[in-house]
Image (cartoon, coloured by chain):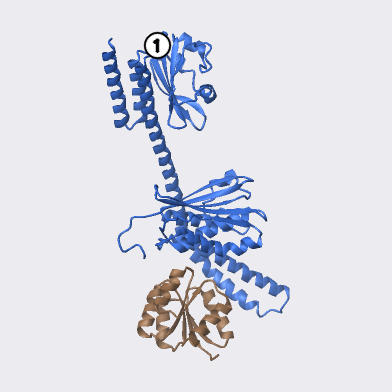
Amino acid sequence: MKSLKVLVIDDESVICNACHLVLTEKGHMVDYCRTGKIGLLAIERGEYDVILLDMKLPDIDGMEILETIKAKMPARHVIVMTGYSTMSNAVEAMKMGAAEYLAKPFTDDELTEAVEKAFIDK
Amino acid sequence: MTSATRFERYFHILRDVIRAMHSITNLQEVLDIVVTKTSEALNAKGALLRILNKTTNQFEVRAAYGLGELYLSKGPVSTETLLSTLTEKDNVYIITDIWNAPRVEYPEATWDEGIRMMVDMPLAIVDPIGLIRIYFTEQRKFSNNELDFIRTVAMHCSCVIERVQAMESQQSRFIHLATQLDKLSSLGRMAAGIAHEINNPLAGILLYSSNLSKKVPPGGALEEGLKIIVKETQRCKTIIQDLLEFARDKEPQRALVNINDIMETALGIVDNEFHLRHVCLRRELTEDMEKAFLDENQIEQVFINILLNALQAVDDNGLVTVQTAVNPEQKKIYVEISDNGCGIAPDHMKKIFEPFFSTKANGTGLGLAVSYGIIENHQGDISVFSETGKGTRFIIEFPSLIDHPTGKGGE
């Protein structure tokens, strides 16, 4: 598996750190930020292969961020994460162009699989 | 008085009584008019109207006319005394021997009141509702017209009482349901908020524990402990998912379906579980089932919930019976799931549809709460009958046809 550049956008530092730990161990490069605003800036500046996006952020709604990313960079792989783990959320996010959906809580294997699968699908 | 004028008098009084019954919504006013007018018509000393209180099983005085305080203070009479000879609902009982009639509970007080004769007219539609007793100060004979008059008043009076009682019981049922629903929906909203807050910390726990469990020496206590943490965290996730499912209160996605097919699918899913436990599953699905507008997935979920509860309730070699039926006149379809298991304890009965109420070690207490919500959303109804040690019967009903705007039916 080629090393991927991953950006995590989540306001929970524990989740950012955990994703960083799990994915770097798998040989990927991980950046993370805690707000939607900084997240959008980071996406514009960096060439990320995969973006892990929390749906509930303190400043901008996750769906709005997903929309912005898909409008500007439609090819970018976005994996949405949310605590509202219901099917309708997943369906909505996929319709908006998300490549994958992770319902919190998830295991390290589920995270790795989602990130690497998003890339293979390309 | 000639018989013609007497007839006219009865007719007028009957007309007044019937008019009161149909125009007045207050039951007490109707009962007061009945005792007053009946006494007047028959030249009686007075009359007493008693209604059977089904909770205490006693006949309670609800209206009185022409009787002294002392006599009235005797209180309610028991059903045994009155019902001992109360067999035919259209029979008028004439009591001439106050002292020895088994139907007279307080003969002395009756005699002191100046009463020498009494006439009992039961109020009943099918089961006894009450009784009108008319009091006379002297013995007399009754013409067929008079007896007919008494019967007619009693018949109309019974209908009014039953109508009012049915309305009252419906009303209290609706109030109960409304509070129940209100409680459930506020709880659901709260649950959705809490679920999100809990899933975030759980995500941290699960990511670290699943990651760490691969780094510790295999087969050791550390690995075992971490695997337990992983498993238990995933269990929390399932509980929260159930809770969110419950809180979502989703509008049913209805289509015109045969409920027998939904039941067959549900039975197919649980069949193996039943087989493993050697529990017999008997199906009696009616062949004339009418189609109904139902959300297949939601109704299937309801059936699975109840079937699995039934499976838990029975011993090995138990029996679970599934029946379906149609009532074309009421435009209703019925599903009954019954078991011969342990039954539901009477003090649990009121709580079984409440969220988080469970008697199972691993239960979330949401299965029946979710089912209840789904059935409500389908304008259906669910009732449960249970006897400890004998079994439980769930009856679910749905309207067989719902008026729906053209073209929206199959959405």
Question: Between residues B260 and B44, which one lies in front from this camera angle?
Answer: B260
Q: Please give the letter of the chain rendered in brown.
A: A
Q: Which residue sits furthest right? A: B220
What kind of element bears circle 1?
loop
The structure residue drawn at horizontal position 71% and vertical position 79%, both measured from the top left corner, is: B218
The structure residue drawn at horizontal position 54% and vertical position 71%, both measured from the top left corner, is: A105
Q: Please give the letter of the chain rendered in blue.
A: B
* B117 lies left or right of B232: left
Q: Which residue sits furthest bottom? A: A2
Residue B136 picture location, percent across and down: 41, 12
Please state which amino acid type lies under the numbered disc 1. Answer: Lys
Q: Quadrant of residue B234?
A: bottom right
Residue B244 picture location, percent across and down: 48, 63
Q: Which residue is mark 1?
A: B141
Can residue B365 be seen from the camera position used here? no
The structure residue drawn at horizontal position 43% and vertical position 39%, both measured from the top left corner, is: B169
Q: Quadrant of residue B16?
A: top left
Question: Between residues A30 and B46, which one lies in front from this camera angle?
Answer: B46
